[in-house]
Amino acid sequence: MKRWAKILLGGVAVAGAGLFLSADYIKLNLNRWITEPTQPNRAVTWQQGPQAPQPGERPPNIILIVADDLGFNDVTITGKGVAGTPTPNIDAIGREGVVFANGYAGNATCAPSRAALMTGRYATRFGYEFTPTDVRVPGWFPTSIIRPDALFARNIASFPSNWEHRTVFDEEAARNLPPPGDKGVPAAEITVAEQLKSRGYHTVHLGKWHLGEAGGMRPEDQGFDESLGFIIGGQKYLPEDDPQSVNSYQDFDPIDRFLWANLPFSVQYNGSPRFAPDRYMTDYLSTQAIAAIRANRNRPFFIYLAYNAPHTPLQALKSDYDALSGIKDHRTRVYAAMVRAVDRGVGQVMAELKRQGLDDNTLVIFTSDNGGAHYVGLPGLNRPYRGWKATYYEGGTHLPFLMRWPARIAQGSRLASPVSHFDIYATASAAAGAALPADRPVDGVDLMPFVTGEATGVPHRTLFWRSGGYRVVLHDGWKLHSLTHPREDRLYDLASDPTEQRDVAAQQPARVAAMKALLAAHDRQQAPPAWPSLIRSPIPLDRPLGVPARTSDPYIYWWN
């Protein structure tokens, strides 16, 4: 992709601004991940483990399943499901294991969240603060039309004078920066795959990466023995004109138009030339996960199964779409069908573990990278929580977070204390017998003692999130949003107000000051951003994109 074009791969940033681009702008000249011809499908031969189990006690296999932009309400064990669509296989992980009722993402957008998940650390500790995008745009790029909804913009006089009513493009930051492929998790970071590989695990990555493609950043360089998927942030699920594909186009979202025009339908194996999957992408990744389990059944393995569903572009398999004929709205039905395919894949993976006799001693973790996105145009993805992907309101960070390990976790377990993505790192490391790195802070903790009752107290009293001038701290059930754009603080008591409806900052000045001190202390321990933010973009808290704006709409500004 031309470097300036990759500004659009930030996705939410421009979509949140309500930007409209003509078709001429959207069809771009792109690099090898987009323009390199996709070769026909070819079989993947997974590296074969021993033909028979090795003697002695075997550590647990570990499977980490991450959906993309899946909302809290999309899964029926935590919500109602999309238009009531059940997710029985995902639910079974929590029903037969533990539900973390207050599981949080490492960040509210995909790449920084995955960076925290992979490293067990706040991604801001190593400068991974913003989703990688390219900040060099051509002279013709219409930055002057990057605005929020027109109705909102026309009524700026009714808002405080310090409120910025448009997406701000930082032209100074846009000069002389590296391409987005060079922005990723540094090779010096020790990933969970490297942790497990040090204990003799065979490590497999499937699906989305989005953590860099420069030397030392690719999955094969970060501890994965095998990687089958895509390095950039997304792919199509089928060719757009495939007779098995049912598509939903969000005409109100310029990023959706960009994705349809430019994303390929492809994967690569350990850096090979790109080739086409032989079926719907979600089913392809599930099928390959099953093959990887079979190949490694006689040795400890770690599989990171990173679905790109249900992230846009919205494409459902026709058979899934037809099975949901009770849903009348087309977009809702396509989205629900995509979630249905993820649930089917989870069930197939779990069934294969049983077939191979591995079910009892496999730790399976299911979560999403962040909350449901407002740019999908559907209102209920994160219900009952407020906010979306790209906000640190509960809708952006409070996720389905489930764990199953029959040998260690009692069925029907539940942990109410806040836990975070970065705890997966410490939990998997402890299960494998890998000591945590001693030369750097590790923010995650092993959750197993809290799940089994061996540990008292809570895993975390305090959690932090940061993106530029938007900082948030959750401490002992109180949550502070500290903003510089506009300059204000918003305080919520999650014990009595879990959906963040009542800002009590004005009534609690001492608590606000104490929590801002926590933020300042945390900031002093973090690294400067490895690359600057490009934009500050408004995300409406209470409505999805495509729904007409009102002058009273509250916004959060997302820095990226």
Image (spheres, grey):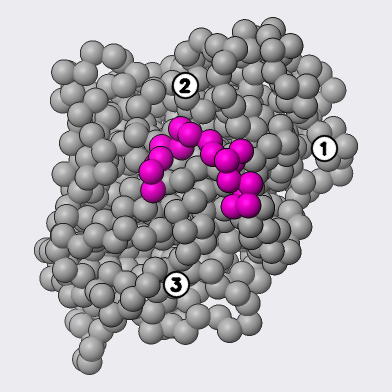
Please state which of residues 10 and 238 is positioned toward the viewer in this rendering: 10
Circle nearer the N terminus (2, 3): 3
- Badge 3 crowding class, 10 Å Cα cut-off, few under 14, some 14 to 19, many 20 or more, is many
Disc 1 to disc 2: CB gap under 8 Å: no
Q: Which residue is mark 2?
A: 543
Residue 470 visible from this viewpoint? yes
Q: Position of residue 109 (x, y in %)?
A: 54, 43
Identity of the amino acid at label 1?
A: Ala
Numbered disc 2: secondary structure: loop
Pick the quarter of the image with the N terminus.
top right
Name the mark on residue 445.
3
In the rendered structure, the answer to whether residue 260 lies left or right of residue 519 reads left
- Number of dots carrying numbers: 3
Identity of the amino acid at label 3?
A: Val
Q: CA distance from mark 2 to mark 3?
A: 35 Å
Please state which of residues 486 and 402 is positioned toward the viewer in this rendering: 486
Please say whether residue 508 is one of the residues in the magenta stretch: yes
Q: CA distance from mark 1 to mark 3?
A: 38 Å
Pick the quarter of the image with the C terminus.
top right
Q: Position of residue 341 (x, y in %)?
A: 26, 38
- Badge 2 crowding class, 10 Å Cα cut-off, few under 14, some 14 to 19, many 20 or more, is many
Numbered disc 3: secondary structure: loop
Q: CA distance from mark 1 to mark 2?
A: 31 Å
Seen in the picture, residue 207 relative to 439 is either above or below; the reply is above
Which residues, given as a range, are shown in magenta? Answer: 495-512
The residue under the point 69% across, 18% down is: 159
Residue 367 visible from this viewpoint? no
Q: Which residue is mark 1?
A: 174
Seen in the picture, residue 421 relative to 17 is either above or below; the reply is below
